[in-house]
Image (tube, rainbow, N blue to C red):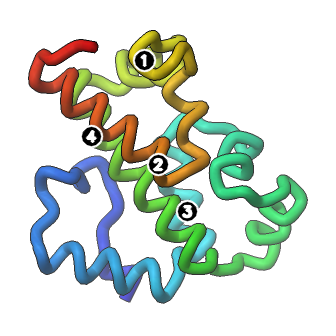
Amino acid sequence: MGQALSIDSSMSYRLIDDKDVFMLISTVREGIKYALFQSIADKIPFSVGEWSNFLHLSERTFQRYKKEKRTFDPLHSEKILEITLMYNKGIEVFGDKANFDAWLEAKNVALGGLKPKELLDSTFGIGLLRDELTRIEHGVLA
């Protein structure tokens, strides 16, 4: 059922309805296949090292997933989906990919002087970025 869910640039928090939430839950429970992850990773400018850090997997384990065409467990699948949703929202808020990518790389005073992408290794950090993007979207700057 994970294949029924289209994970692309049109997938955004704003566009998710109850039906989509149940598809997300189902996708997480089944796990994301490495091929689907690869299609996501091709669109999001993070290195294998960064993804392995975000997912708390060693790079060697990550390479094994690729080689064996494995399916990520539910915890890793959920994190992949959260990052994808946050990334798509960022592009939506900033108006284009290049501007959002630059924001992810720049130290941010509102985020304690951290680069936004440094917060992608935890659900709390992803939530903080989502909240910050909402503030930016509505013109409320810290």
Residue at the location (53% across, 81% down)?
Answer: 31
From the viewer's side, name the closer residue of 124 and 86. 124
Amino acid type at image mark 1: Trp
State left or right for residue 134 relative to residue 64: left
Label 2 residue SS: helix
Name the front one of labels 1 and 2: 2
Q: Is residue 79 above or below residue 1?
A: above
Residue at the location (41% across, 56% down)?
Answer: 82
Label 3 residue SS: helix
Residue at the location (30% across, 29% down)?
Answer: 132
Q: CA distance from mark 1 to mark 3?
A: 23 Å
Name the front one of labels 1 and 3: 1
Q: Is residue 95 among the parts visible in the rendering? A: no
Q: CA distance from mark 3 to mark 4?
A: 18 Å
Location of the N terminus (image quadrant): bottom left
Q: CA distance from mark 2 to mark 4?
A: 17 Å
Q: Position of residue 42 (x, y in %)?
A: 54, 46
Tell me the number on the disc at residue 89: 4
Crowd tier of the residue under label 4, counting other residues whose Cα lies within 10 Å: few below 14, some 14–19, many 20 or above: many
Q: Which residue is mark 2?
A: 124
Q: Which residue is mark 1?
A: 103
**Chain-order first, disc 3 or disc 2:** 3
Q: CA distance from mark 3 to mark 2?
A: 22 Å
**Chain-order first, disc 3 or disc 4:** 3
Q: Which residue is mark 3?
A: 37
Q: CA distance from mark 1 to mark 2?
A: 19 Å
Q: CA distance from mark 4 to mark 1?
A: 13 Å
Q: Position of residue 66 (x, y in %)?
A: 75, 67
**Chain-order first, disc 2 or disc 4:** 4
